[in-house]
Image: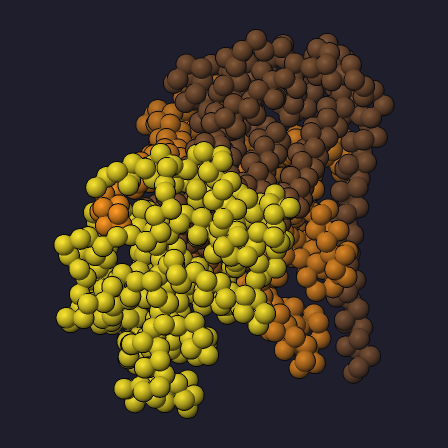
Chain colours: A brown, B orange, C yellow
Amino acid sequence: MIERSRFRFDGHLLLVWAAPLTITAIFVWIVGGVLLHGLDQLSWSYLVEAPRRAGRQGGIGPILVSTLLIVSVCLAVAIPLALGAALLLAEFVPRRSTGARIVRLSLDVLAGVPSIVFGLFGSAFFCSLLGLRFSILSGGLTLACMILPVLIRTIEQSLRGVPNAYRMGAAALGLTRTRAIVTVLLPVAAPGVLVGVLLGVGRAVAETAALIFTSGYVDRMPSSVLDSGRALSVHIFDLSLNVPGGDAAAYRASIVLLLLLMLINGGMLCIHSLLKRVMGISAQI
Amino acid sequence: MFQSVIDSPRRHGVIDVRLRRTLWGVAGLASSIIAVVVAVVATEALPALRGVELPRFLNDPSWHPTNQRYNLAPMIAGTFLVAGGAVALGTLFGFLSAIFCCFYAPPRLAGLYRGVMELLAGIPSVILGLWGLTTLVPIVAAIKAPGFSVLSATLVLGLMIVPTIGLVAIASLQSVPRSLILGAEALGLPKWLTVVRIAFPAARSGLIASVVLGIGRALGETMAVMMVGGNIVQVPESLFAPVRTLAANIALEIPYAEGLHRSSLFVSGLFLTLVILVVLCIAEWLGPEPIHD
Amino acid sequence: MYTQLAETRHGHLGPNLEFPEPPCRPARIDGQARDLLWRVSDLGVHYGRKTVLSSVSIGLPKGKVTAIIGPSGCGKSTFLCCLNRLSDSMEGCCVEGRIMIGSQDIRSPSVDDIALRRRIGYIFQKPNPFPMSIRRNLELPLKAHGVRDAAEIGRRIESSLVAVGLWSEVKDRLNASALHLSGGQQQRLCIARALVLEPEALLMDEPCSALDPIATGVIEDLIHSLRQRLTIVMVTHNLNQAKRVGDEVALFWCRDGFGYLVETGPAQRVFEAPQDELTKLYISGRIC
């Protein structure tokens, strides 16, 4: 009897250890594969040169610029909106009030819309209806709509993480709500807000489906945000699926994209620990 | 003088009132986006909804939108097939990962593995697609050609949602009161039973939420599935047959689609959104907590 | 009448520590010619449907320390919050009755709550310095109330830190985080932060309950030294502390879930010859 139960227990143990081992192995396989296939021709010139022969050769200079512009447009639009909505939800309306519920519900629904549908929406609304055509602006605005819910949620949560004692302390000193928010609450919540923003950036940089038909495929250096520009992820997609013999180039670009994401993640951790040290508080996420 | 000061008109409050009003404006704008998205997609879908009777999207002879044949059934079947398989895989591995992190692994290893899952969650789908395309597809092809198949798509998509499900499941298992677990162990319950009988029911709503998030992500995913699925319009007959999902269909055809064809792609987008929203609603209804909290 | 406000806004606030009584209207209650800062009548407070305080009527004398005692949960802190309308910041808190300062009901919507709180400081149970430097903690309220002049800010920071006895301890590290101070120092910093606005009154909600005995002694000494300049209302659940620092004592009690005022009067009188049976039992320690 005892032997039997011990045996069963070991079976579960095997299962429980096998799953994470498999996932870790695959993760190493993926990252290793990307590095292995793409690392050999990676150089500084690759980052600044223009692509040649549909991207099989040359670099990704214009593509990086386009990516940067798309993300900038996206953040320039999304951050003010997210900050405003999050401040309202966290500081000005009771949690269970009708208004707050409606705002939250609509954001939850927005968060559920798949990215391909954002692509459809962007191409119909920004590109056609507003006449922005295939442009960095269209792409950035589409991404802004997409990352807004996650941005609002993280910012709201970090504001809610600010101890109420600070709110009361500020009120007791005769600070207006506005001043308390600007001088006390936002600085305290800043690490969380930044982490939220970087989370949004990470998502925006990784996104492909919403960009294919909004910011377009053109791999020239964009001269303004009204130009079409190819994002890095779109570049990888295009090389791997539409360009015969583009796999190596796709892997090379993938390394850059992964590095970019790691940089963002690293930045997130750095900001977090720095602010934690300086302010003696930690971000609530 | 005290009295005169406190008796002044409330000029200090004005700035708060203004800020509040501004914020309501901003929040209103943010929350109206979903309405605009739905309205725009619905408007674009309207010609097809008017010009093609709804049943035809399911029982037309084929999907040849340029020849007025609008059968979306193969794509719908493909979508549910791939998503179903991926969610099954993702749930199995995600839950096992969560159990590993919360109950079996030493703390440092658990933290490390969590980090791996977070990194995996951060890998863009296009890179996973690329990996699937160049690594997984040849392996599957070695078993049975062509390699671009339901199986490849399911595996890649499943891999994508393992961290989605795993990370949320970890959070919800961690929120189970420690005393409950200790109490069960004090009764001499084996660890596995403690997990399955005590921890899982206690974390029920969070676990459901994790699976629902996984379903949502699986149904909506485009790039990775498109890159490894083969994209042939057919109801796949086996695991090794190529498949085209709704999302892939949209991504493949929207660049050149016009008229009713384009419109019918918007119909499929609208349908996809509705399905995901229904899933989210069911989860909301099942679990007492809001999904995203 | 508005000159004071204008001065506040332009940062030339003089050391106007006590505020002169309007010449023709001496404050009186029941014919007693006592100088009262607050005259509270029929105060009731509830959160939603739950009543926390009911029909409290009390006068709080100017320039004295009033100690509010009573068991926990009898609405002492809530009462304190009402005195500078901090209750406004609490979700779902509803206040009834009249809270007069001079001839003005501070509950009236025409009262500027911001200006009111600038004149009446509040110290919380748990020290709550903001997570920033010591200097910034003290600068913040000054700047918020329109003091811009750097020299004036420096002077006020120093004098308030001197007043709480913290100056010698922190003068070399004003730019260090306030969170690195000890609990007692943090609480004194919070008092300094309130004093920097040169308030007329200070409300203290069990200011020592989170501190060790030595830090408590320091704070009590501080209260002694401040009583010349300020009206202090202090909640405490420590009878000995009430005896040590209170000029006036008010006992709150809790019945059927809501708090009410049992007895109030000069500390000596209340402790030596309590009139209410409940007070007798409570101060003799037989119920708590």
Q: Is residue C136 depicted above or below A226 in this figure?
A: below
Residue shown at 76%/42% (left/top)?
A: A27
Q: Position of residue C21 (x, y in %)?
A: 22, 54
Figure disc tally? 0
Q: Is residue B77 depicted above or below C270 in this figure?
A: above
Q: Is residue A150 visible?
A: no
Q: For this view, does B161 lie left or right of residue B262?
A: right
Q: For this view, does C232 lie left or right of residue C164?
A: left
Q: Is residue C264 visible?
A: yes
Q: For this view, does B211 lie left or right of residue B159?
A: left
- Tell which of C102 and B139 is nearer to you: C102
Residue shown at 28%/66% (left/top)?
A: C60
Q: Position of residue C45 (x, y in %)?
A: 27, 66
Q: Is residue B263 depicted above or below B107 in this figure?
A: above
Q: Position of residue B233 (x, y in %)?
A: 57, 30
Residue shown at 47%/14% (left/top)?
A: A133
- Tell which of C8 and A64 is nearer to you: C8
Q: Quadrant of residue C272?
A: bottom left
- Tell which of A64 and C163 is nearer to you: C163
Q: Position of residue A9 (x, y in %)?
A: 76, 71
- Tell which of A278 and A28 is nearer to you: A278
Q: Is residue A26 depicted above or below A16 in this figure?
A: above
Residue shown at 64%/26% (left/top)?
A: A233
Q: For this view, does A57 lie left or right of residue C175?
A: right
Q: Quadrant of residue B14?
A: top left
